[in-house]
Amino acid sequence: MKHKAGDARLVAILGTAQTLGWASSYYLPAMLAEPMAADLGVSPVTVFAAFSLALLVSALVGPLAGRKIDVGGGRPVLAAASLVFAGGLVVLALAQGPIGLFLGWAVIGLAMGSGLYEAAFSTLVRLRGSDARATITGITLIAGFASTVGWPLSAVMEAHLGWRGACIGWALLHLVVGLPLNLSLPRATRVVRATPDAQAQPVPDTGAVPVPGAALAAVLLAFVFAVTWFISTAMAAHLPRLLQDAGASLAMAVALGAIVGPAQVAARLLEFGFLRHVHPLLSARLAALAHPLGVVLMAAGGAAFAPAFVLLHGAGNGILTIAKGTLPLVLFGPQGYGLRQGWLTLPARLSQAIAPLAFGAAIDRWGAGALWLSAFLGAAALGALLLMPKVAPR
């Protein structure tokens, strides 16, 4: 009972902190890009280019942050990320031109690489080991509402305080909410490993586990993460436009776009309830199938099947977010999880950075037919999951 209460506390702390982190970074440009661009005398494309820089920086920071969590636990890393988030948002608020814009987003990228899901998942694994699956699912349930909370709050702050005031507001929230939450996390204990002379010596749980098939599994998993994050980011940036190209009205496209978040959360509830009793690889395969299946349905039935496509895409994306935390844990074990997670998600961060521009170019050329590209990528991810070798972690 005490362990369950501790898990609930961890989920509440990290879920709330993650909601704040995602809302004030990943979901910030959607509301502030246009006023930011107008005030700084640049185009919205320039603002999104600065955001892409943040994603690139976060990709490079990820392995280092994971290593730090493996050695000393997530509490100091996540607390530092709260301070860096606040600092980056203040730099952004003080920007007077493109240099300040890119500098602010670069600092925010440092925080994203050390303070979002990968760091939170690594923290949970450091604290709970192989039993972290349920808590990983739990924090994604709460943070799944980051856009639901973040977009309206950014819009309200921008309307009353301007975009600079909105950035300062988010920075203050990191200092008065995010930082205390992350500092309240339990300290990670050092792992005791038996030595040949039967004496126990405390050593940090940082090394990789050499097991048969691990190298191939890691390559396939990195490919799956890169492809699925590309699809997720492309849909987040272009879904309303795609739906209109497929024949939906503007009102219908906006309404359907709004149900992606609830579809993700509903799927995560399914994972938390029923699917947690099956191997994460099976739930990941089903989730990878969802987007291509939705594309086929909408291609066959037109705009009438757009709701089915949106629901399938959202549900699949919701479960795949959990799989990014649970699959490396199940396939490779908890040892060296943070560092491994950083390297596994590095290609995904890079693909995420180019997704809006690359998929936008595909839509310019093919219209709604660009969905066949995302369907092909989703099918490739499913194929990689089907080819995943059996790995037996120590």
Image: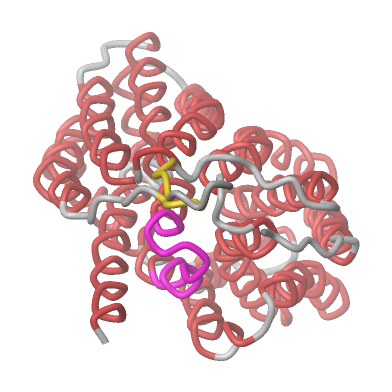
Q: Which residues are magenta?
A: 124-138
- Image: 81 above or below 237: above
Position of 294 compared to 312: left or right?
A: right
Q: Residue 186's x, y, as percent?
A: 23, 56
The residue nearer to you, when weighing 237 against 197, is: 197
Quarter holding the N terminus is bottom left
In reply to whether residue 378 is colored magenta, the answer given is: no
Please state the horizontal and vertical placement of residue 120, each as a whole percent of the image. Answer: 40, 52
Tell me where residue 171 sits by quadrant. Answer: top left
Query: Measured along the vertical axis of the image, is residue 120 above or below residue 44?
Result: below
Question: With 250 as the anchor, is 116 left or right in this view?
Answer: left
Q: Residue at x 26, y 16 (%)?
A: 95
Residue sticking out furthest to the front: 197
Main SS class of the magenta portion in the image: helix
Q: Position of residue 96 (x, y in %)?
A: 26, 11
Q: Between residue 96 and residue 73, name the one nearer to us.
A: 73
Instruction: Name the spot of residue 57 as percent of width and height, x first.
Output: 50, 25
Out of 186 and 143, give the one closest to the viewer.
186
